[in-house]
Amino acid sequence: MLQRRHLLATLTSAAGSAAVGLSSARAQAAAQTPAQSYAAFLDSVRTQALAQGIAPSIVSQALTLTRIPNASVLKLDRHQPEFTLTWAQYRDRVLPESRFAKGRSVYAAQQSVMSPVSARFGCDDRAVMGIWGLESGFGAHDGTYSVIDALATLAYDGRRSAFFRNELMKALQILNDGDIAPAAMIGSYAGAMGQAQFMPSAYLRYAADGDGDGKRNIWTSEADVFASIANYLGKSGWQVNEPWGQEIILTKALDKNETGRTRQRTLGEWMALGVRRADGTAFSRRDVKGAVVQPDGPGTQAFMVYHNFNVIRRYNPSDYYALGVGLLGTGIVSA
């Protein structure tokens, strides 16, 4: 009985000591200034990076780029617009005639570089031009934020801290590989990098060397940008020289349950339901499978989309985005 009482007393004492220790730790954490708390977070990142084999010099160079959480990054992350654009509004915003005109001029200058690179990585120029144009305005706008600063901020105080911490570690791995210097690694407030706007995880999977210098520089090497976009789509199943889709007209309204990118029929079956090419003529082939997408609903612009439409969606899972890429790329390269 005495032994049991002694054991209970010991356990109670230990629990009390642990509670006091935990309370003390909490009090110590609460007493830290925001700068001290962020510094402690960065110390944990440093420890993790070193344990993963990142060179100490790279870790030090990278983490000197972020001293306190970036208020601009947090503001953008927490106050994203809640309104939803219609397809017509989105189309008018991202596909002005000026973007087509600029794209044709840029393509004329870059085709000799782009075409062989696109073909080497299993894609074609239409898709590469479309994505390059939407992501960075053909390289004109690739972001102004330090990727390390943005990712560290969001890993510390973001809505998806675990996701962004993982991306931060991958960004450090990229720096360790030597493709880019820490200060030159710029991108969006959410850490999407360079002219292709790859997150670090996508970069490690798909970034490619297009100019043969041994690096994968999606910031300032157009050839590497083209190679990386083409490699992404090629590895996602792009079918070379096949269309992504085309505008169509509906001679009679389709039931909503019959539309959508997953509801495929042969073109022969669609023609029986009153679907025609945009000029009102019949499709040249009846056996090809496609799906009708009508983003704004009955009576509005409609498209027949094929396999490559869904490949574009692997880059950004949005029907609007895939339509924008397809229309822009086709309008530039096929003009």
Image: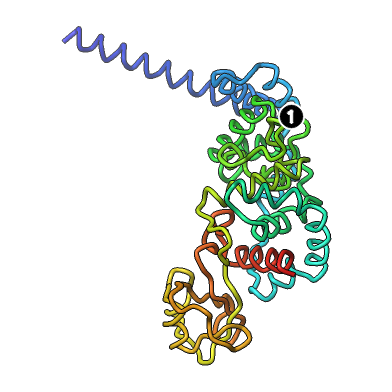
Residue nearest the observer in this picture, 31 or 318: 318
Front-lying residue, 27 or 286? 286
Q: Residues within 10 Å of mark 1 (few under 14, many from 20)?
A: many
Residue 26: x and y in percent read 54, 26
- Residue 177 location, x and y as percent? 64, 26
State the count of labels: 1
What coloring was used for the rendering? rainbow
Name the kind of residue labelled 1 in the image: Pro
Query: From where the camera sits, is residue 134 visible?
Result: yes
Furthest toward the left, the residue is 1
Q: Secondary structure at mark 1?
A: helix
| Outermost residue, bottom side | 252
Q: Residue at x 16, y 10 (%)?
A: 1
Which of 320/73 is in front? 320
Residue at x 67%, y 42% (from the top left corner): 191
Task: Tell me if residue 67 can be seen.
Answer: no
Please name the residue shown 53% across and 38% down the image. Answer: 162
Image coords of residue 215 (percent x, y): 69, 32
x 61%, y 28%: residue:
173
**61 relative to 284 in the view: left or right:** right
Q: Percent x, y for residue 277?
A: 58, 83
Q: Is residue 141 left or right of residue 250?
A: right
Q: Identify the image quadrant of the C terminus.
A: bottom right
Residue 262 position (above or below residue 247): above
Q: Name the residue that disc number 1 marks.
A: 182
